[in-house]
Image (cartoon, rainbow, N blue to C red):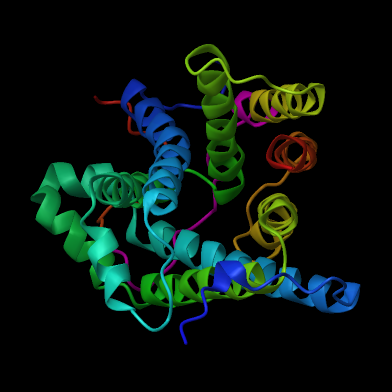
């Protein structure tokens, strides 16, 4: 009566558009989460300075009283569960590298648009190099 | 070297970010692979898994990762921190090669070279974008946050 998920074979053919949509969901959720978290930490200020002023408790309080931080964590959690969902249908060797590497590029775009980060040629090049590198290394 | 003002302590935190995530993942993977298959009929065994040594170590490392990642984001750009994070993959691959004697395919060596190049690129630039004025609401620190914290 108990069927282990591991014994259920993966579907032989899954529509590539469905696979792409699953990966896109992970990339979208994790990019949103990273950007919101980064915005939250920027609005809080240098944690090392806060800790020097008001101790570790003060630093933790500063983070936990920031609503943006929880918005970020919500989307990071959403990304995690979409990853689990995708892993249920697709192979780790596809989903892992694809989502990790694409996220680097989408974050560079989102960092420039939403965080107004100075994404110069150096950072574009880095995002693309690391993106391809992570794909090759993790594949 | 040139125009970014990271203190040794901040380099240490970036190093922690890079290393703790892949090490934590490896511990989780090692711990979970050693467990008998967990089914939805017995979700309690998932809770029990948390207290096995490798999984617990993995969770501790990932908590450490998140704390250092948040700290890094508080003084550096997201587009600076993320490529640095990816360097962890390289460290782990090299550890696996020289410590565990695993073989690395040509494809993976190419990946290692590309990531290293990319990290080298960002590391040459500034770590934080300077904005004219800090955001109004929600600021805890009295002075505007900036990279001018060289005092440690």
The residues colored magenta run B121-140
Query: Where is residue A55 drawn, in percent x and y?
Result: 10, 48
A63 part of magenta stretch = no
Asked whether the viewer can see residue B75, the reply is: no
Quadrant that contains the N terminus of chain B: top right
Residue at position x 26%, y 42% in the image: A48
Q: Is residue A41 above or below residue A132?
A: below
Query: Where is residue A19 drawn, in percent x and y?
Result: 80, 72
Residue at position x 64%, y 73% in the image: A8
Apparent side of residue A15 relative to residue A105 in the rendered image (left or right): right
Apparent side of residue A58 relative to residue B97 in the rendered image (left or right): left
Q: Is residue A11 above or below residue B27?
A: below
Q: Which is nearer the eye, A97 or B54?
A: B54
Q: Which is nearer the eye, A64 or B100?
A: B100
Query: Where is residue A36 drawn, in percent x and y?
Result: 50, 68
Q: Where on the picture, by quarter, is residue A65?
A: bottom left
């Amino acid at each position: 009566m108990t069927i282990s998920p591991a014994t259920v074979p993966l579907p032989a053919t899954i529509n590539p558009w469905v696979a792409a949509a699953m990966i896109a969901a992970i990339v979208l959720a994790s990019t949103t989460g990273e950007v919101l978290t980064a915005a939250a930490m920027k609005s809080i200020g240098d944690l090392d300075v806060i800790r020097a002023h008001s101790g570790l408790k003060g630093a933790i309080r500063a983070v936990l009283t920031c609503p943006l931080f929880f918005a970020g964590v919500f989307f990071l959690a959403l990304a995690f569960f979409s990853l689990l969902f995708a892993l249920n249908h697709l192979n780790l060797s596809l989903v892992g590298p694809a989502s990790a590497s694409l996220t680097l590029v989408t974050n560079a775009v989102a960092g420039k648009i939403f965080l107004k980060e100075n994404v110069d040629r150096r950072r574009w090049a880095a995002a693309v190099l690391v993106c391809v590198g992570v794909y090759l290394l993790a594949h | 070297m040139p125009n970014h003002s990271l203190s040794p302590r901040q380099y240490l935190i970036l190093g922690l970010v890079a290393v703790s995530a892949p090490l934590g993942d490896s511990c989780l993977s090692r711990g979970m692979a050693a467990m008998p298959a967990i089914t939805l009929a017995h979700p309690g065994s998932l809770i029990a898994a948390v207290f096995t040594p490798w999984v617990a170590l993995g969770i501790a490392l990932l908590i450490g990762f998140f704390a250092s990642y948040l700290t890094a984001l508080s003084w550096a750009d997201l587009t600076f921190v993320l490529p640095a994070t990816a360097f962890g993959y390289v460290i782990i691959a090299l550890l696996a090669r020289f410590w565990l004697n695993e073989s690395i395919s040509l494809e993976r060596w190419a990946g290692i070279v590309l990531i290293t190049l990319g990290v080298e690129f960002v590391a040459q630039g500034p770590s934080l974008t300077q904005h004219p004025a800090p955001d109004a609401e929600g600021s805890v620190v009295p002075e505007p946050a900036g990279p001018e914290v060289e005092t440690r």
